[in-house]
Image: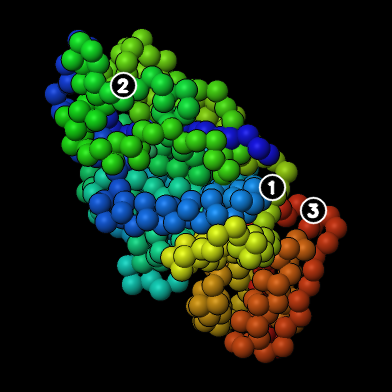
Amino acid sequence: MDTRIFRASPSAALGLALCLAATGAVAQRSAPATGVDDYPPALAERLARQHGLEQQAAAKLSSPRSDFIISRRRWSAGDTILVAFNGGTPALHAAIAQVATEWGRSANLKFDFGPPGRPRTWSTADTNYTAHIRIGFNQPGYWSALGQDSLNTVSFPPNEPSMNFERFDVQWPHVMPARWKGVVLHEFGHALGFNHEHQHKECFDEIRWEAGEAGEPDVYQVFLAWQGWDKAKVDNNLRAIGIGPGVDLASPLDRRSIMLYAMPAAAYIRKERSKCFIAQENLVLSVQDKQGARQAYPGAAGEVFANAREVVDEAISRAASPLSDAEAGALQTRTSTIAVAQKPLLYIQFGSESQRSLARRIQASGRTAGFMVPDIENVKNKRAIPSEHQVRYFREQDKASAEAAAKVLEAAAGPVRVLAVRGRVASRVHRNLIEIWIAGPTT
Ligand SMILES: [Zn+2]
């Protein structure tokens, strides 16, 4: 597990006209400001600070395992990831869901957008997370949190989007950007934890970091003219992502990746002849994107860091030099994020409409207890309803969560039995879920 990884991402709506300016002159700015992923300044600053503190702290720990835990932002294989929208119509939500689901054909990971016709929503008044991924339309730009960062309470609190598609809500369906599907695939690539392909180490040497001898502008000038980016932003978005501890999957450079920017040829020393240059944005998942998704989210359930907090705490106690309060705080937030990301989802099932309001109360208190609670469901006629209140769990690692869920159910409904489901049924359930069953009404 010591290889690194890299996955790329395509950037959404880059203007291609610039590629024609091949003579070394900087192309005219022809792309919309939203052409490449670009966090709003305040969010970019918050993320840079958070990631910087994590890295500083990790460097003091000199513990490969804790480094790995801190820096790996992917979900666990087999997980169901809840997605919610704020704004836009159900038709737009369905369209985004359909495109995003492309990833799920390769990755052993399921995006759950809510029941058909009733997409899940989140609100800026939320105090608990209603979904792992929260999509919004009214911030500037197209962007997404990287994997589990969407649950980092400092970087992406519950009342803020973790993914943004600027103005899609007003553009749908008639004036959508031509490349919108590529944008959605790219941002969901980030949500799966994949980085940009142009930050692949092989592209680092291709980029013109310094002005050429014949007066060719450096990449900073190229991006200033093209996107209006300052140096820090260029470095953040283009510098190679090293062999850092969190980079645990390696793949060769992929020019067809949805995670690769179609940036102006002038950004590269060899211009159009650079192996990282593409004249047009990639708009669909490449063969290698799909392979990477399979590798990152394999069929068998992946490694679970149930004890992430302990591993990191242990590393902190043995650190060569003490961590600052800010560094320790950043690690605390990071390990809490991992715990939330790994928590099983709470499915609430009942068999009589008279219990719907009780189910809703349990849903609310489940969320307060830190659970992600998908929509509650009346399963009458589909499943046998038990005669006692039950919490069922399927994986040993979910036992503590099942007991916490039992407390939630008990407070609302009375005595509860906690059942570890084993055998054939359990072997089909690799996902991060536990079930609450409300007993059938006594007649
Ligand atoms: Zn991107």
Residue 300 spot, x, y in % from top left: 73, 43
Q: Secondary structure at mark 2?
A: loop
Q: Quadrant of the C terminus?
A: bottom right
Q: Secondary structure at mark 3?
A: helix
Instruction: Please state if 270 lies on the left or on the right of 21 as rendered.
Output: right
| Real-space CA distance between mark 2 and mark 1, rounded to the nearest whole angstrom | 39 Å
Looking at the picture, which amino acid does disc 3 mark? Answer: Ser
Residue occupying the far right of the picture:
423
Viewer can see residue 352: yes
Horizontal side of 100 relative to 411 (left or right) equals left
In the rendered image, which residue does mark 1 sit on?
302
- Are discs 1 and 3 less than 8 Å apart at CB? no
Q: Circle 2 is placed at which residue position? A: 208
Say which of marks 1 and 3 sits in front: 1
Which label's residue is closer to the chain start, 2 or 1?
Answer: 2
Which of the two labelled residues, at mark 1 and mark 3, occupies the earlier sequence position?
Answer: 1
Q: In the rendered structure, which amino acid carries the disc numbered 2? A: Arg
The residue shown at (45%, 71%) is 128
Name the residue that disc number 3 marks.
Answer: 427
Which quadrant of the structure image shows residue 45? bottom left
